[in-house]
Image: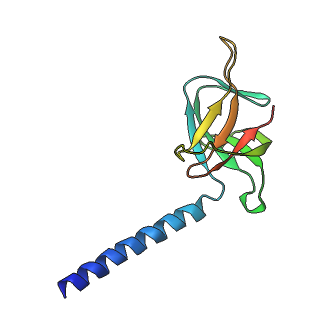
Amino acid sequence: MLARKIVHTLLGVVLLGVLASSTTGAMNASRTTYFTFSGTVQMPGVALPAGTYIFEVVNPDGGSDVVKVLSRDRKTLHLMRLTRSIERRSGGNLDAAITLGETAAGIPPKVKAWFPQSETRGREFIY
């Protein structure tokens, strides 16, 4: 009897975890990601000073490759551009990430690509 209660309790916890993770995925269809830069970075046509920015896919339901970059408070749209879909290197973790390009000394790095959390595909910015 006690073993049966324990099994039912564990199954309930597992089910709750599955439901919570699937709900979280549905809520973030636009792949909203916050990044904080400690210095200026370049993006196509704009330089972003140090600060926190929101990266999102514009129309996730339509398979869009358009990405927008907003201020943390969502009041300023800094960038809305077409991107290319790219694959993340295999074998790495699936944390949200930004790939920066190399530049000469004293020139802010270019943001090359954005990879949303838990995604194997990312968005490469077109310069």
Give me the residue at 47% from left, 67% from top. Answer: 20
Give me the residue at 78% from left, 48% from top. Answer: 66
- The residue furthest top is 105
Examine the image and state in which quarter residue 14 appears: bottom left
Residue 88 location in percent, x, y? 64, 44
Q: Is residue 99 above or below residue 86?
A: above
Q: Nearer the viewer, residue 37 or 94?
A: 94
Q: Nearer the viewer, residue 103 or 35?
A: 103
Dividing the image into 4 quarters, which one contains the C terminus?
top right
Dividing the image into 4 quarters, which one contains the N terminus?
bottom left
Give me the residue at 42% from left, 74% from top. Answer: 15
Tell whether 30 sits left or right of 23. Answer: right
- The residue furthest left is 2
State how the image is colored. Answer: rainbow
Q: How many marks?
A: 0
Q: Nearer the viewer, residue 69 or 114?
A: 114
Q: Nearer the viewer, residue 101 or 24?
A: 101
Residue 90 location in percent, x, y? 60, 45
Residue 97 location in percent, x, y? 58, 39
- The residue furthest front is 91
Give me the residue at 28% from left, 79% from top. Answer: 7
Residue 117 location in percent, x, y? 56, 49
